[in-house]
Structure formats: structure tokens, C-alpha cells
Amino acid sequence: MSPATEPELIVRRPNLGRELLRSALTAPGRPGGSGSLPTRVLRLPAARVDTSNLYAYQRLCGSAVNDRLPHPYPHLLGFPLQAQLMADRDFPLPLPGLVHVRNSSVLHRPLTAADRPDLTVWAENLASHAKGSTVDLRARAELAGETVWESTSTYLHRGPSTGAGNGEGGSGEAEPQAPGVPDRPVSARWRLPADLGRQYAAISGDVNPIHLHPWTARAMGFPRAIAHGMWTFARTLAAIGPRTTDPGTAQVWFRKPVLLPSTVGLVRLDESSRSTAALVGPGTPAERRTHLLLSWEPELP
């Protein structure tokens, strides 16, 4: 879906840390799910990829270190624009406390560090949820007017259910169904260090306090710092193999936060038409927690 409003051009990529701080300062008094979404659309022309940042991202996320962009990497380019949109006072949901519950992205053609895509972001589909309200943050990357990558990040604002929602941009599309945990043994175990959140924050710019230190995480209701959801997405997708940098669709459902430090296990099932994977905690299949469910489908020729 394309935004209905003409994009507002942004000359320079926003500083993500500054936008997260601004969002905290402007959070009080937001109407929540009973409000209305802004029609503002932001576009950053010719976004540049910093190769040293790309290589650091690839090493931390377990990808091959080269000039090919991992499938989730364009999210890092577009998220500062989305944060700017959510930090504005006319955005109804407060950014602090929003929970990233789902992400869906489509890569239409391989991207490299030499590409300079035009990035466009907007919000849509403010809707009721059993636990509060959800909203979709959309992002699109274009080269010479052609859409080469697009994504939908769905966030949950916990609170009273708002009933039928306010009708802002509702797509009428059914929520995609998450796959089950593959009926396979754990194929890999990863020991995640206590400072993983700080490592990813240094690369992504996402300095949300819940990821940085046990003290700041506890202030926001978590017993310890938690891993960034987009890191768990990228690490799991990288484990499926290099074909995930080819055109295809990746969908991820974030279930339970990954506390740091911890050990997680990868369970995966690869088929010709689709790969499914789960990131799970320790224990037997009946005991362990499911942190993430993922599906990857290559684009058919």
C-alpha cells in the first residue's frame, strides 16, 4: 500500500538517540488508541550505507561480511525516520513502552552498500487489540522509482482495548498466521553476553534503555536487559543461510523477550518453498519458552 499524502523530504537522516529522547519527553498526554494517526509521510532521498557500520552489523548478526545488505539491514536506515514520526506530539501512542510484536519485509532485488535508495516511511492501521492498540509503521526503499524493499513493523501499546479502533487507514487484511515451532531438534545454541544490547545499540543507534543495562531495564519492568528484537530477527535469518539476501519475504513474530545474558537455541526446518525457524529457551520442548517465530519464502522466478 502507498501513502496517500505527498512525502515531506528530509535532508539528513535523523539522529535516532535524539529522537528516542524526544519521544520520552513528548510521551505524556498521548491519547493512545482512541487518537488519530498523523497523515505525515517522510522521505529521505539517496540514503547512504556506511560500510564499516554494515560490516560490524554483519559480524554481530552472524552474516557473511561483504557488500551485500542482509535482508533486515534497510530497517536500520529507515527506523530513525519512523522514530521521528512517532516522537511528534500528533502521534497518538507514546513510543516509550511500545512493544515490537511483528515484522514483515519483502526484498524485491538484492541490495549492496553501493546502492543509495530513497526511503519513505509512514504510519497506518491503528487498531484495537486484546491487550490494547496496535499500529503499523511502514517503510519502503526505492531505486530509480522502483520499490526494491518494503517492510511493516507492528507495535503494541498495552492498555485498555479500544473496541473497533478508530478506522485510521485500516487495511482490512487478516493478520498473518505465525508458524508453529518446527518439530526438529535444536540445531544450534548461542550464548548471548550481558552487553549484547549495548553492542547492537552502538551499531543500530537504538539506545532504548531496556536493552542497555539491568538497572535501566528494571526501571521499565524487566528483570534484566533484553536483546533487541531486530537483532534476534537478523541472527535467526542469517542462520538460515546466504540465500536470505536474495529476493524473498521474511516474517517474524516476537513472542517472549530474550533476557541478557542467556542461552538460546535455534530450531529450523528448511523446505524448497519455505524455511521456518524458532528461537527457544533451554529445557524440553514442553518446558522451554519461545522467543521468536520466523518464516522465509524465496521469491519465485
Image: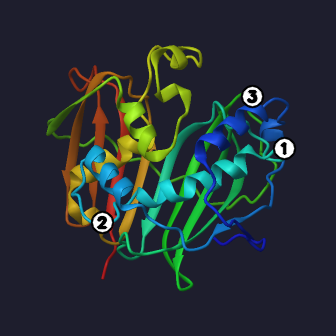
Q: Nearer the viewer, residue 17 or 290?
A: 17
For marks 3 and 1, give the CA distance.
13 Å
Give, as a three-letter code, the residue at label 2: Thr
What is the C-alpha distance between the residues marked 2 and 1? Answer: 38 Å
Q: Which residue is mark 2?
A: 245
Left or right, residue 76 beside residue 119: left
Q: Are marks 3 and 2 in contact (CB under 8 Å)?
A: no
Query: In front: mark 3 or mark 2?
Result: 2
> In the rendered view, would you say 256 is above or below 183?
above
Q: How packed is label 2: few (under 14 Cα within 10 Å), some, or many (20 or more)? A: many
Q: Earlier in the sequence, mark 3 or mark 2?
A: 3
Measure the C-alpha gap from mark 3 to mark 2.
40 Å
- Determine the residue positioned at 59% across, 46% down: 16
Tally the numbered discs: 3
Circle 1 sits on which residue?
Answer: 35
Quadrant (top left/top right/bottom left/bottom right) for the N terminus: bottom right
> Residue 40 is drawn in which quadrant?
bottom right
Number of the front mark, 3 or 1:
1
Coordinates of residue 51 in the picture (x, y in percent):
36, 61
Taking 165 as reference, is 121 left or right? left
**Residue 259 vertical placement versus 227 (above, below):** above
Who's the residue at 28% across and 19% down the image? Answer: 287
Whether residue 201 is visible to the viewer of this picture, yes or no, is yes
Query: Which residue occupies 46% across, 20% down?
Result: 213
- Taking the image as shown, residue 241 lies to the left or right of residue 181, namely left
Q: Quadrant of the C terminus?
A: bottom left
Query: Residue at the location (23% across, 65% down)?
Result: 243
Are there few (<14), some (14-19), or many (20+) residues within 10 Å of tag 1?
some
